[in-house]
Image (cartoon, rainbow, N blue to C red):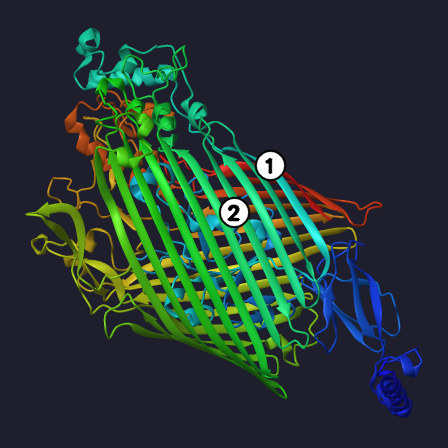
């Protein structure tokens, strides 16, 4: 080579320098090392390949253990078999860390193979990093209240929505599933209801990108099947989630300002890990059924009550007149000996859910990736072929530059949902159809109308409800280390959510006696809606360490824009039903909803965190928010918080404590806000009616302007004590909180003469939520082959309307009472049944001799839970594990009487309705039977449905989750690992509630199902 002499000279010069410097280098190294190298001094600085296996104390390989060369950015992680390979110098120290295990530091000391056994440290408070949104914090050092659930608990539950995996597991978080129909939504409250009229929805952040949770469903289309709540969170595949953090107090939420008033939910998806490329497959199949049927009357009981009711109403003689048979076909025309259990017939089927997931991950210490996809198909318990399908794709790539200064993380989630359901839930019919109602089909297989004497419930299966939903979320997070203590960060995100749904209503699905035709009746209603959102968040982080003091500073700004478009059309009248999907063929086309809105949001935020001697911590957060939902001069609001913590277990007088191993006292105080009122409320608004006057389009005023209303404010206070005993084998966290929400944004009622129902404005009302939260985790038994751990949480919330000036003179007086919760219901107080008349009796509060709708509805019942929580136990024996989790709640809810107060109507009801008043002097809990034709009894019936007797105890203890898991021993094939599991959800409920489900109180919507799932995971 032409440059060979130059290369040779450089090599000789390098060797000469090494010979001269080696003695000094070796002397310095040996004098400062904690161990002596056995290698010759001239090999100490050379890199060699080190490999080995990392296992737990049971000898099971640990996947995902991080191995880092101490003092450098070089690292890797173990593959599924616990194996790793890394280049290191002979005098390097390798640091092995893994969540739930004690970090170990092992010197290379010239070894080519290092096998490491890691000891369990279930609590590992100092090692667990908690996602706090704009920053992360060690669990031990957090000053705010952040609850957390990880993939370990999420993946053990057969759910379609991540909210379903959180029920009962987290203190202060009350979640209720709205329906057992696939694709439905959830209600969630974090520490109660803060605002009188606002939603309780928290802010959702997925991988740093806000995720709008508001449904774009239209009630006219989907209220009958999923309560018009189509949760956008269904787009998230629960098994793609690594962890979910719930931010609750001021210290944790104030940095999110106006968006954090109802709490913040941070969802972090799975990331790729360095090491060999891994392929993971998960296959599962689930069976779902209604967990509880009501005890309804049989045919003989029902007909006895019905005949008695007709006689009581004074029409007994007409029962013998065939001309009136059409009035009560159940008594006269239908088979008097026929009995059908309509609960089993209409909602007693089995719903099947099949799920398949595949992911590929791997990479180096610098670049890691993960790509995964999933397919799910779920049917219903209804007759027919209704089903829900979901296709999802999740990808993530992380890159770190060779010098460790530049990092980039890119995440993308795409989901396609297809929900094909009947337009109406069959649950109402299942609970109310007479037991002797006719056959569903005739002998030739067509819908049976039984001589036009009834509405066949299966006719609605021809009226399709169909929804197609596409969701896309992308996010990029980039950071660059300008200086050793200064880092710049940029977070970019984009969301797109689209829904196209339709509902058909065919003339053939209605009783032929109505004479409906496709030209005059058949209709299609469509909803085409979309939501686009982007966000940009540049940030600067600065950290400095001075002796025993650590200071962290974060400054950033947010730019966010969201546009929402919705168009709902209804086409009525078609030449024939074959053209009904072509809305252009409709005789009459009507615009039901047409809206376009834009929401812009801009903010500045900051954080200052000071830690002294690793035991005194102060955290300051602040945010200035700007929202386009307020008028000029009112668009900006300032929010902030202070959080403090004292790790008193680090004090020298407790450092050697054998009983108390961890102790922290923390507190926080601050404010968050809310602009959750919808767009353009401060402006006068108009609706396009579609009508014309003299050729001019008519506009209908829909809203009156008020540019003066401002931000709602939620002031939060919290004190907490965290304790660990016996080397943290027992952890107890106790928190007391008090949130006061003021400057309430509501629709202030206006006089009818104004032409408007209400005016959006601020009320000088204050709502307080306070309570206690207790969380306990313990390692009861831990030895080589057997482990037993317990988790427990309980929340005791209390809600109160502290003040509402002038409420007695407002329309709110019929709903709220100062000093009472805002979750109350003002109802009649039922005092029994008059033994002389058989009518219900009620307390006459104003003593005017008349039971009126307002003055006498003064009895108060609170429907908010008194306390709720969960208890879980996990037992592990070698490769076999069993997890059992119970959920409990103390509460009241509407019962059967809220649906039907009188016995004898043409609806089947509970056998309890047989205990009715029958003759003079009877002491009974239920009124005289009526067929509905004695109109003088109607007020008594309706008042009873709105009385305290329609509300009863709905407390329950539920066996919510059971998971049996077995890792098949790896025999001879180290590259394949197989795990089989059996999961159950909603398996058993202990309750005295007489309705369908104590947590889901509806008698017209399908309750959550009992699910049993069998599956297997394969790792290659």
Q: Residue at x 45, y 48 (%)?
A: 470
The quarter in which the N terminus is drawn is bottom right
Residue 997: name its quadrant: top left
883 or 257: which is nearer to us? 257
Q: Residue at x 34, y 10 (%)?
A: 336
The Cα atoms of the two marked residues, 2 and 1, are separated by: 24 Å
Q: Please provide percent x and percent y for residue 644.
A: 50, 77
In this orientation, does residue 684 appear? yes
Q: Please provide percent x and percent y for residue 555.
A: 47, 79
In the depicted structure, whether residue 978 falls above or below residue 191? above
98 or 667: which is nearer to us? 98
Looking at the rendered structure, the secondary structure element under dot 1 is strand
Query: Which comes sooner in the sequence, label 2 or label 1?
Result: 1
Badge 2: residue crowd in 10 Å (few <14, some 14–19, many ≥20) = many
Q: Residue furthest front?
A: 2
581 or 376: which is nearer to us? 581
Residue marked by disc 2: 887
Q: Residue at x 85, y 65 (%)?
A: 114
Residue marked by disc 1: 285
Residue 443: name its quadrant: top left
The mark closer to the camera, 2 or 1, is 1
Q: Please provide percent x and percent y for residue 572.
A: 24, 33
In the depicted structure, whether residue 875 falls above or below residue 664? above
């Amino acid at each position: 080579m032409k440059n060979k002499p130059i290369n040779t000279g450089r090599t000789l010069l390098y060797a000469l320098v090494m010979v001269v410097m080696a003695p000094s280098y070796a002397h310095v190294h040996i004098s400062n090392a904690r161990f002596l190298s056995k290698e010759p001094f001239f090999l100490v600085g050379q890199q060699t390949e080190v490999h080995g296996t990392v296992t737990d104390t049971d000898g099971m390989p640990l996947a995902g253990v991080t191995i880092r060369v101490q003092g450098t950015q070089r690292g890797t992680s173990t593959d599924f078999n616990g194996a790793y390979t890394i280049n290191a110098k002979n005098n390097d120290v390798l640091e092995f860390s893994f969540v739930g295990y004690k970090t170990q530091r092992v010197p290379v000391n010239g070894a080519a193979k290092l096998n490491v056994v890691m000891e369990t440290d279930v609590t590992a408070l100092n090692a667990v990093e908690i996602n706090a949104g704009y920053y992360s914090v060690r669990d031990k050092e957090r000053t705010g209240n952040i609850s957390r659930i990880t993939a370990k608990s999420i993946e053990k539950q057969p759910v379609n929505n991540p909210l379903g995996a959180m029920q009962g597991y987290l203190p202060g978080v009350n979640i209720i599933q709205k329906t057992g129909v696939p694709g439905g939504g959830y209600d969630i409250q974090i520490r109660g209801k803060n605002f009188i009229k606002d939603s309780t929805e928290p802010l959702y952040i997925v991988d740093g990108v806000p995720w709008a949770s508001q449904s774009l469903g239209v009630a006219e289309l989907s209220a009958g099947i999923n309560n018009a709540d189509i949760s956008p969170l269904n787009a998230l595949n629960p098994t793609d989630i690594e962890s979910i953090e719930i931010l609750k107090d001021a210290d944790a939420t104030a940095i999110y300002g106006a968006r954090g008033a109802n709490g913040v939910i941070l969802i972090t998806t799975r990331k790729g890990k360095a090491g060999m490329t891994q392929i993971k497959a998960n296959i599962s199949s689930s069976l779902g059924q209604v967990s509880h049927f009501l005890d309804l009357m049989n045919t003989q009981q029902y007909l006895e009550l019905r005949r008695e009711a007709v006689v009581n109403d004074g029409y007994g003689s007409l029962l013998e007149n065939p001309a009136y048979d059409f009035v009560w076909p159940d008594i006269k025309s239908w088979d008097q000996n026929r009995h059908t259990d309509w609960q089993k017939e209409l909602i007693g089927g089995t719903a099947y859910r099949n799920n398949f997931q595949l992911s590929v991950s791997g990479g180096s210490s610098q670049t890691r990736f993960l790509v995964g996809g999933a397919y799910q198909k779920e049917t219903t318990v209804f007759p027919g072929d209704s089903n829900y399908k979901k296709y999802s794709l999740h990808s993530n790539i992380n890159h770190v530059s060779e010098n460790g200064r530049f990092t980039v993380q890119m995440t993308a989630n795409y989901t396609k949902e297809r929900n094909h359901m009947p337009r109406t839930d069959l649950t109402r019919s299942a609970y109310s159809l007479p037991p002797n109602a006719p056959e569903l089909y005739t002998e030739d297989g067509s819908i049976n109308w039984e001589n036009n004497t009834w509405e066949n419930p299966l006719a609605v299966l021809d009226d399709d409800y169909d929804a197609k939903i596409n969701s896309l979320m992308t996010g990029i997070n980039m950071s660059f280390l300008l200086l050793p203590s200064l880092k710049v960060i940029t977070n970019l995100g984009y969301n797109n959510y689209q829904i196209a749904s339709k509902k058909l209503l065919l003339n053939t699905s209605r009783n032929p006696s109505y004479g409906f035709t496709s030209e005059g009746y058949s209709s299609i209603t469509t909803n085409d809606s979309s939501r686009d959102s982007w966000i940009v968040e540049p940030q600067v982080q600065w950290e400095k360490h001075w002796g025993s003091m650590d200071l962290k500073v974060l400054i950033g700004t947010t730019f966010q824009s969201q546009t929402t478009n919705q168009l709902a059309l209804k086409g009525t009248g078609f030449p024939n039903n074959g053209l009904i999907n072509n809305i252009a063929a409709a005789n009459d086309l009507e615009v039901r909803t047409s809206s376009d809105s834009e929401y812009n949001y801009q903010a500045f935020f900051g954080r200052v965190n000071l830690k002294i001697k690793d035991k005194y911590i102060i955290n300051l957060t602040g945010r200035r928010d700007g929202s386009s939902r307020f008028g000029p001069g009112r668009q900006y609001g300032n929010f902030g918080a202070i959080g403090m913590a004292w790790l008193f277990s680090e004090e020298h007088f407790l450092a050697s404590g054998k009983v108390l191993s961890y102790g922290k006292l923390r507190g926080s105080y601050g404010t968050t806000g809310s602009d959750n009122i919808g767009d353009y409320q401060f402006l006068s608004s108009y609706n396009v009616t579609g009508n014309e006057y003299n050729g001019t389009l008519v506009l209908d005023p829909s809203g009156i302007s008020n540019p003066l209303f401002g931000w709602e404010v939620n002031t939060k206070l919290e004190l907490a004590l965290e304790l660990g005993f016996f080397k943290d084998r027992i952890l107890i966290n106790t928190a007391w909180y008090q949130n006061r929400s003021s400057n309430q944004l509501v629709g202030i009622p206006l006089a009818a003469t104004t032409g408007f129902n209400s005016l959006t404005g601020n009320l000088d009302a204050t709502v307080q939520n306070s309570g206690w939260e207790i969380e306990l985790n313990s390692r009861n038994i831990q030895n080589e082959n057997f482990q037993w751990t317990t988790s427990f949480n309980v929340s005791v919330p209390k809600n109160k309307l502290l003040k509402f000036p002038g409420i007695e003179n407002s329309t709110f007086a019929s709903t709220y009472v100062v000093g009472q919760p805002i979750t109350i219901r003002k109802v009649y107080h039922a005092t029994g049944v008059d033994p002389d008349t058989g009518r219900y009796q009620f307390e006459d509060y104003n003593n005017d001799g008349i039971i009126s709708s307002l003055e006498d509805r003064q009895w108060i019942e609170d429907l908010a839970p008194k306390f709720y929580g969960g208890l879980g136990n996990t037992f592990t024996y070698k490769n076999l594990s069993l997890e059992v989790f119970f959920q409990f709640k103390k509460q009241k809810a509407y019962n059967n009487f809220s649906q039907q107060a009188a016995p004898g109507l043409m609806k089947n009801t509970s056998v309890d309705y047989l205990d009715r008043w029958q003759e003079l002097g009877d002491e009974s809990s239920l009124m005289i039977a009526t067929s509905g034709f004695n109109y003088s009894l109607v007020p008594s019936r309706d008042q009873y449905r709105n009385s305290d007797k329609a509300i009863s105890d709905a407390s329950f203890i539920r066996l919510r989750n059971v998971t049996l898991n077995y890792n098949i021993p790896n025999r001879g094939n180290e590259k394949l690992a197989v795990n089989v599991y059996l999961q159950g959800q909603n398996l058993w409920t202990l309750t005295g509630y007489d309705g369908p489900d104590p947590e889901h109180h509806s008698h017209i919507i399908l309750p959550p199902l009992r699910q049993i799932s069998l599956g297997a995971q394969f790792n290659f």
